[in-house]
Amino acid sequence: MTTTAPAIELKGISKAFGPVQANKDISIRVMPGTIHGIIGENGAGKSTLMSILYGFYKADAGEIFIGGKKTEIPDSQAAIAAGIGMVFQHFKLVQNFTVLENVILGAEDGGLLKPSLAKARGVLKHLAEEYELNVDPDALVEDLSVGHQQRVEILKALYREADILILDEPTGVLTPAEADHLFRILEGLRAEGKTIILITHKLREIMDITDTVSVMRRGEMTATVKTSETSPEELAELMVGRKVLLRVDKVAATPGAPVLEVENLRHTDSSGVERLKSISLNVRAGEILGIAGVSGNGQSELLEVLGGYRDATGTVRVNSQDIDLTGRYSDGQSRRARGIAHVPEDRQHEGLIMPYTAWENTVFGYHRDPSWQKGLLMDNAAIKAEAAAKMERFDVRPPNPNLAARNFSGGNQQKVVLAREIERNPEVLLIGQPTRGVDIGAIEFIHQQIVALRDSGKAILLVSVELDEIMSLSDRIAVMFDGQIMGERLPSETDQTELGLLMAGVTEMPARASTGQSNGAEAQT
């Protein structure tokens, strides 16, 4: 009896960056024709391990076997030659090239492009028919939706005859419908014998699509289990090392009067493109209004206008008092003075100054507060003491206020920003992508802090591309598409399918199945 060799086998892989041990003696077997999930907290070593497999890093120790044969992978060209393709979270596409040009880039047949393009056109036609990877080969990548750009990345790998595909957080920028289509593509690839490694932090996706799942924690492989024999709760505990509450634990909201009122808000960017088109909404005291939508549909601009980063026209009121949207009063400082706190979507570029210490970052934006002054200078000792207290209350690890922001993990960087903004006791909290790139233990904590602020009577405007997060945290949901509000829903009266259609700009909903008495009548006919 012959046994099938693993498509991939890693034995004793170790990798250190200075004193940091990113991977420690990791061994893993991935069988051919399967979808193998890899999950773990931030800094668990997942990306490092896959970067070693794809030739971006060289392991300090260990061996790689492809199809049972020991294989050296010093660079990505060697990985491609070994039949490995990788679809990165941030696509590696040339925006002003066509689909065809992107597919053949780096894989041209000789010095003349015409034969390569003709060959690629035929191959793409075949792949489109076989795997539902339909993309116009002559379209410019910059004109494609995010979902179609992802298909181009998969086509690139298949064009290079990859038998093994690594996908890093592939659904982070997709609508639910696009994510479902991606999973059908992956199932088709698996049926054809392709081997797929799926890196994701979404436990629901792991449970829905994978055959096997490996869990990493602190640079080590803690478990590999059959997906059918585990549960989200067990996987979360394996990732974090303790039991994790996967649902948002909150009581029903008891909203008060409107705190934030927005009417006919419009914003046109520097290129003359209208990004916000007559936005009207309100957020009441003791309420979380969630804004759902695919990235790039105006949510970022909405937060930036309300946070004072961009000018706009229209009306914005906080506690019935108008806010100036243009001129010198349209800035973050004036917003904070009016009780608006802002946790921006991009914590590293907008929420923190990475080379500065944690204690300095806990006061940025509020450094002119008289309570931090000591004569003509700032009272650094008081700021450091308060920063240490904030870090303890928000469970920032390590709790060292003198450590530079860049030396914290993504989740702990986010906690520093949250501590700074929430502890100012704002009237309104604007919060964008609160758990982007954050591990599951920190997600639980961040959600608890947001709900606690709501329960203290504050108004919260939440923007997230994670529908699960929107559904579980929000008291009301507004959906944005192409700079407009497509509709509002209560979480208890909608579902991800309906929200996904609104996110795609579809307002005419398909008829739902009849219920109640009419169902009984139909059953009798």
Image: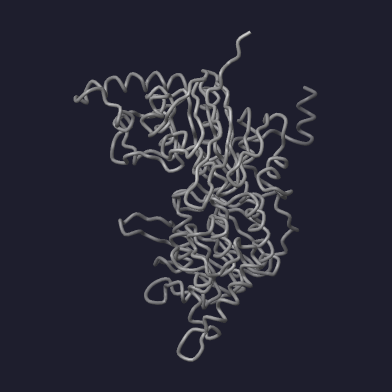
Q: Nearer the viewer, residue 216 or 471?
A: 216
Q: Position of residue 163 (x, y in %)?
A: 46, 22
Q: Which picture quadrant has residue 122?
A: top left
Q: Nearer the viewer, residue 510 or 398?
A: 398
Residue at 48% across, 26% down: 164
Q: Is residue 299 above or below residue 115?
A: below
- Asked if residue 39 lies left or right of residue 247, the reply is left
Q: Which picture quadrant has residue 525?
A: top right
Q: Position of residue 4 (x, y in %)?
A: 58, 16
Q: Which picture quadrant has residue 105?
A: top left
- Asked if residue 279 lies left or right of residue 115, the reply is right
Q: Nearer the viewer, residue 44 or 279?
A: 44
Residue at 72% across, 30% down: 229
Residue at 58% across, 31% down: 28
- Asked if residue 290 lies left or right of residue 277, the reply is right
Q: Position of residue 178 (x, y in %)?
A: 51, 36
Q: Is residue 312 above or below residue 520?
A: below
Q: Position of residue 433 (x, y in %)?
A: 54, 55
Instruction: Report how many numbered discs are placed on residues in the image.
Output: 0
Q: Residue furthest bottom?
A: 375
